[in-house]
Image (tube, rainbow, N blue to C red):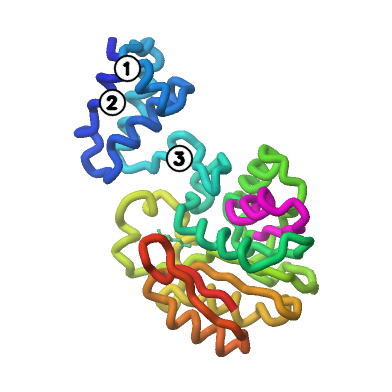
Amino acid sequence: MATVKENLLRAAELAQSDSARLDLEVLLGHVLGRSRTWLYTWPEYALSDSEQQQFERLLKRRAAGEPVAHLTGEREFWSLPLLVDSSTLIPRPDTELLVETALALCPQSRQRVLDLGTGSGAIALALASERPAWQLLAADKSPQALALAERNRSRLELGNVQLLQSDWFAGIPAQTFDLIVSNPPYIDAADPHLEQGDVRFEPRSALVAGRQGLADIDTIVAASGDYLAPGGWLLVEHGWQQAAAVRALFAGAGLVGVDSRRDYGGHERLTLG
Ligand code: GLN
């Protein structure tokens, strides 16, 4: 029988992962129903046969490349425990910049907010958790994504978020919003990054867009004018080399106050106007 400590020494089995030790901790904590801290408090705990078997199965799938978040079914975003599955993008820390920027730009009082391509619901739910007075509409074209977002919405009991099936603005009833946010697909189909790591297990429809990754951003920006209230903001996440092109799309659509913001890695990751 192997102990916690012995199982945590198996990083070599996850050689392709750049976070092997962390992966082991998260997967072992998941199997045991314990926190990562607990593992270090009880290093001598010997796993039962069924716990060990479950851990072996997860380790094998992780070694084959499956994202840790798919194996545990959960990922934390903005301190919210979100359910995840293969129907949407796994929420990323980069996208917390969008949440932070939206919170800083808009007043706390009631705001009408639209999240386009909500996926797991990450952005809308993070905003809703911080701003109970805001009214959020979270849209996605994928019924599977909406089902996941709904599970997250009800689990977090965030009643100020409404969900709607819509392909970008196509299904949004005529109205205006004080804030429109989106983390759309923006990767070019030929980007070699798509063949590496977690993205291989995420839906292409959430990652890849035509015209060097700019096609969906263009669709959103071009139509946003019809849906923005006077003084309202549009915030769009994009790739770190796309900022100048995205600013040009914003300006071309007549948006003003156009600016890009850098993520913690120092890359321009978000444009607003
Ligand atoms: N930032 C993600 C990545 O590079 C992609 C997110 C997206 O396409 N919206 O993996």
Mark 1: secondary structure:
loop
Say if the magenta span includes residue 225.
no
**Residue toward you, 179 or 41:** 41
- Asked if the residue at label 2 sits under 8 Å from ligand 1, the reply is no
Seen at 41% across and 49% down, the residue is 201
Which residue is found at the position 56% from the left and 75% from the top? Answer: 272
- Image marks 1 and 2: residues in contact by CB distance under 8 Å: yes
Q: Any mark on residue 43, and which?
A: 1
**CA–CA distance in space, label 1 to label 2:** 9 Å
Q: Residue at x 43, y 35 (%)?
A: 71
Mark with earlier residue (1, 2): 2
Which of 82 and 210 lies nearest the eye of the viewer?
82
Q: Is residue 115 placed above or below 60 in the rendered structure?
A: below
Compared to residue 37, the image places residue 139 above or below, namely: below
Q: Are marks 3 and 2 in contact (CB under 8 Å)?
A: no
Residue type (three-letter) at the residue carrying disc 2: Leu
Mark nearest the camera among 1 and 2 is 1
Can the viewer see residue 116 in this picture? Answer: yes
Q: Image point 38% across, 19% down: which residue?
A: 41
Could you tell which of marks 3 and 2 lies nearer the N-terminus? 2
- Circle 2 residue: 8
**Residue span colored magenta:** 122-139
How dense is the environment of label 3, judged by Cα within 10 Å: few (below 14), some, or many (20 and up)? some
Rendered position, 78 above or below 59: below
Q: Which residue is mark 3?
A: 70
Is residue 138 a member of the stretch shown in magenta?
yes
Secondary structure of residue under mark 2: loop
- Residue 145 visible to an observer of this rendering: no
Residue type pointed to by label 3: His
Q: Which mark is nearer the camera, 3 or 1?
A: 1
Three-letter code, disc 1:
Pro
